[in-house]
Image (tube, helix red, strand yellow):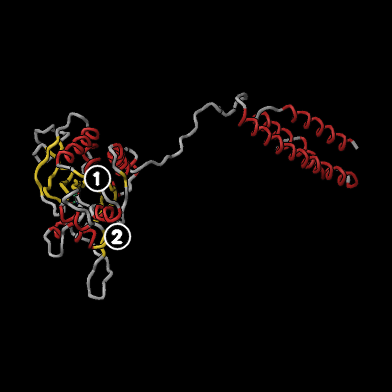
Amino acid sequence: MDEIRQIEELKTGALRELVAIGSTKGLEAWRVGYLGKKSQLTGVLRSLGRLPLATRKAVGARANEVKAELEAGFKQKEQALLGAQLETLSGEEAVDVTLPGRALPEGRLHPVTQVLHEISDIFASMGFKVVEGPEVEWDYYNFEALNIPKEHPARDTMATLWLDYETESGDRPMLLRTHTSPMQIRFMEKVKPPLRIVVPGKVFRYEATDATHIPMFHQIEGLAVDKGISMADLKGTLYEFARRFFGPDRQVRFRCDYFPFVEPGVEMAIECAVCKGAGCRLCGGSGWIEILGAGMVHPKVLERVEIDPGIYSGFAFGMGIERIPMLRYGVDDIRLFYTSDLRFLRQF
Ligand code: DAH
């Protein structure tokens, strides 16, 4: 049968060409030529009706088999070309494997965490051990043992978030710590002097939110107790911290302040970075920005943890953290740190 021979020749030729093809464009031309609507093979299948019944069956069957073989060959070649394309630099549609890859989105530490680490590292290099304490506290550690008994006015300055837990006598002794100072007591209950610690962590206050207030923020507490520790040690340590963190040119100022758990108490301010002490909006016209409270540990606090204030003395300090990156980077709204806006956070 002529028709069958024609089909066999067609197949042999098509497969020979297929082997030699080196590009997807070439392959597509091959597909159109041998399997497309206007191909010879399609023509044969279309004209079957004109053949005598006897040959029609045999020719039709063979033509369909060849068609399937050519289609399978096409698929295989297509895969091979795609694979080769990914690996080589030759060929018109090749992938350039020397192009730099797309950067994967990369996580990083939150700006407040970065600052906490930086400050902890400075104190660690001065011999302070970094420790952490619980965020849910007892009234005893947060107030009582720090010389802030019930009815003490200092309690009102730290609007407290109390936990719902009530004792049989109707007391509500649990709270979210309003400062990191309770860890002074916890640590000195267990460890006797000489000791030097810093305590970074979250603190909570029941406050309306605005550009400078949020109900959760961070502090870092410091405590050093030994024989013969004086106010000079406190000032020397905090000067050194300020020099390392803010740079050697920024002025530092100490003034008297009151905190129930220290005597005497001080507040430390640094020269405003924006106006260099001249007075501007950022520092409220004063030229100074307060960054921490500090003082010599109150003898009553030492007595409470059975450390003899006749033998030992110490200094303590507590610093708010969020203010510091705000001052450093000129962030004018504290809430920006906690709204999880990646456009903001990616800048640090
Ligand atoms: N705990 C105080 C506060 O949150 C800050 C403070 C002041 C801590 C004086 C101290 C200190 O250790 O000595 O306002």
Q: Is residue 61 above or below residue 38?
A: below
Q: CA distance from mark 1 to mark 2?
A: 19 Å
Residue 332 lies, in percent from the top left, at: 21, 42
Q: Is residue 17 above or below residue 108?
A: above
Q: Residues within 10 Å of mark 2 (few under 14, many from 20)?
A: some
Q: Answer with left or right where residue 39 lies relative to residue 56.
A: left
At horizontal 12% and vertical 61% (from top left) the residue drawn is: 152
Residue displayed at 26% across by 62% down: 138
Proximity of marks 1 and 2: CB atoms separated by less than 8 Å: no
Q: Amino acid at mark 1?
A: Ile
Is residue 266 found left or right of 30 in the rendered image?
left
- Comes first in the chain, label 1 or label 2: 2
Q: Nearer the viewer, residue 86 or 189?
A: 189
Which residue is farthest top? 90
Question: Quarter of the image containing the N terminus?
Answer: top right
Q: Position of residue 136 (x, y in %)?
A: 29, 60
Task: Please tell me which residue is depicted at 40% across the width and 42% down the height of the picture.
Answer: 107
Label 1 crowd bin: few (<14), some (14–19), many (20+), radius 10 Å: many
Q: Which residue is mark 2?
A: 136
In this rendered view, identify the residue nearer to me: 23 or 199.
199
Q: Amino acid at mark 2?
A: Val
Describe residue 93's horizontal placement relative to residue 132 as left or right.
right
Could you tell me residue 257's position as x and y percent? 10, 47
**In the rendered image, the vertical position of residue 130 relative to residue 161, given as above or below:** above
| Percent coordinates x, y for residue 299 in the rendering | 15, 53
The residue carrying mark 1 is 321
Quarter-of-image position of residue 189? bottom left
Q: Nearer the viewer, residue 194 or 281?
A: 194
Q: Is residue 66 visible?
A: yes
At mark 1, the secondary structure is: loop
